[in-house]
């Protein structure tokens, strides 16, 4: 790490220390940083994203499974939430 990089790191972490004391400032900082990151690394590089075709393929598969009686049913939202939290 060069002296210039070390100085920038120190400035960044110093600013973050001040910002971290205020939740609203943290939210603004995160949004700003995310915009910077998105410009450097486009969201299309996100491995969690899927194509439109893959999405509809999964919807069709889920519909077929449901029609075969393989779907999940919940009597209330608490049961559904508990199931989803355990995935």
Image: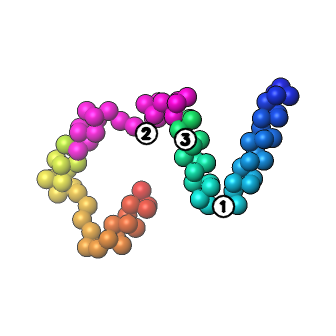
Q: Quadrant of residue 73?
A: bottom left
Q: CA distance from mark 3 to mark 2?
A: 17 Å
The picture places residue 72, in percent across and down from the top left corner, at: 26, 61
Could you tell me if the residues under marks 1 and 3 are in contact, i.e. CB atoms within 8 Å? Answer: no
The picture places residue 6, in percent across and down from the top left corner, at: 82, 33
If the image is split into quadrants, where does the C terminus sit? Answer: bottom left
Q: Which mark is residue 48?
A: 2
The picture places residue 47, in percent across and down from the top left corner, at: 45, 35
Residue mark closest to the camera, 1 vs 2: 1
Start-end of magenta stretch: 38-59
The answer to whether residue 53 is magenta is yes
Q: Which mark is residue 22?
A: 1
Q: Residue at x 57, y 35 (%)?
A: 36
> How packed is label 1: few (under 14 Cα within 10 Å), some, or many (20 or more)?
few
Of the pair 82 and 35, the residue shown nearer to us: 35
* Earlier sequence position, callout 1 versus callout 3: 1
Of the pair 25 and 9, the residue shown nearer to us: 25
* Earlier sequence position, callout 1 versus callout 2: 1
Q: Which mark is residue 34?
A: 3
- Residue 79 to residue 30: above or below: below
């Amino acid at each position: 790490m060069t002296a210039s990089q070390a100085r920038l790191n120190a400035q960044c972490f110093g600013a973050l220390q001040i910002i971290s004391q205020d939740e609203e400032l943290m939210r603004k900082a995160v949004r700003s940083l995310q915009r910077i990151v998105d410009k450097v690394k486009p969201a299309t590089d996100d491995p969690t994203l899927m194509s439109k075709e893959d999405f509809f393929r999964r919807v069709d598969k889920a519909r077929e499974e449901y029609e075969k009686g393989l779907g999940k049913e919940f009597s209330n939202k608490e049961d559904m939430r508990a199931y989803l939290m355990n995935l």
